[in-house]
């Protein structure tokens, strides 16, 4: 299917606060102690995530590693920012790369390179909104991106 609304309806995706649409499809019943979060977390979580043309996943970070898997649509650009270096990765059929890993604590953003990108995201230990923050909580880093990376101002 080349219609993003098909996936939104089929998988009951709802708006995500970082942009795009999502649905949590798996949350492990097992828990582990996260030394990073200093709390128990589900072992792993997984969501479906979709970005339409013109939508962006705002710069944000989670405490734990996140694995992005490409499913359908057009390639997805993932932008990582560690506070000093901005790096782009593209996943999708066209470049024969179907996954990317963003290490915990690294800021990330994403955008579709086309009409839409339908992907999955797994976080381990599992995602918890307590472990999530937007880049706009980090004023100094925002100013650095605006100054040095002017083409990414729309992702903040």
Image (cartoon, rainbow, N blue to C red):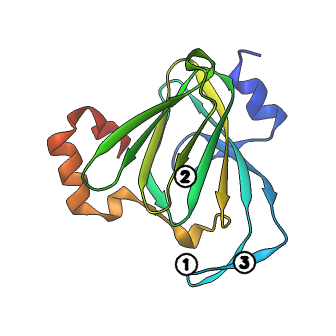
**Residue that appears at 51% across and 67% down:** 63
Q: What element carries label 2?
A: loop
Residue position marked by numbered label 1 in the rendering: 37
Rendered image quadrant of residue 28: bottom right
**Residue 112 in picture, x, y percent from top left:** 52, 27
**Residue that appears at 14% across and 44% down:** 147
Residue that sits furthest to the left in the current view: 147
**Residue 131 in picture, x, y percent from top left:** 54, 70
> Badge 1 local density, few (<14 within 10 Å), some, or many (20+)?
some
Viewport quadrant of the N terminus: top right
Judging depth in this view, the residue of 9 and 25 nearest the camera is 25
Disc 1 to disc 3, C-alpha distance: 11 Å
From the image, state whether disc 2 or disc 1 is nearer to you.
Answer: 1
Pointer 1 or 3: first along the chain: 3
Q: Is mark 1 on a helix, strand or loop?
A: loop
Disc 3 to disc 2, C-alpha distance: 26 Å
Residue position marked by numbered label 2 in the rendering: 17
**Residue that appears at 58% across and 53% down:** 66
> Badge 2 local density, few (<14 within 10 Å), some, or many (20+)?
few
Pointer 2 or 1: first along the chain: 2
Horizontal arrangement in the rendering, residue 48 relative to residue 10 (left or right): left
Residue position marked by numbered label 3 in the rendering: 32
Q: What element carries label 3?
A: strand
> Badge 3 local density, few (<14 within 10 Å), some, or many (20+)?
some
**Residue 70 in picture, x, y percent from top left:** 66, 32
Horizontal arrangement in the rendering, residue 19 relative to residue 68 (left or right): left
Q: Are marks 2 and 1 in contact (CB under 8 Å)?
A: no
**Residue 99 in picture, x, y percent from top left:** 61, 37
Pointer 3 or 2: first along the chain: 2
């Amino acid at each position: 299917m080349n219609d993003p609304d098909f996936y939104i309806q089929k998988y009951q995706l709802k708006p995500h606060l970082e942009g795009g649409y999502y649905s949590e499809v798996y949350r492990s019943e097992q828990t582990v102690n996260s030394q990073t979060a200093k709390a128990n977390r589900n072992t792993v979580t997984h969501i479906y995530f979709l970005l339409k043309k013109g939508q962006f996943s705002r710069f944000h970070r989670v405490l734990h590693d996140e694995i992005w898997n490409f499913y359908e649509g057009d390639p997805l650009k993932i932008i990582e920012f560690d506070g000093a270096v901005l790096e782009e990765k593209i996943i999708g059929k066209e470049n024969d790369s179907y996954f990317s890993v963003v290490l915990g604590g690294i800021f990330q953003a994403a955008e579709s390179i086309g009409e839409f990108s339908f992907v999955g995201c797994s976080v381990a230990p599992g995602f918890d909104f307590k472990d999530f923050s937007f880049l706009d909580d980090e004023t100094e880093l925002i100013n650095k991106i605006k100054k040095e990376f002017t083409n990414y101002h729309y992702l903040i």
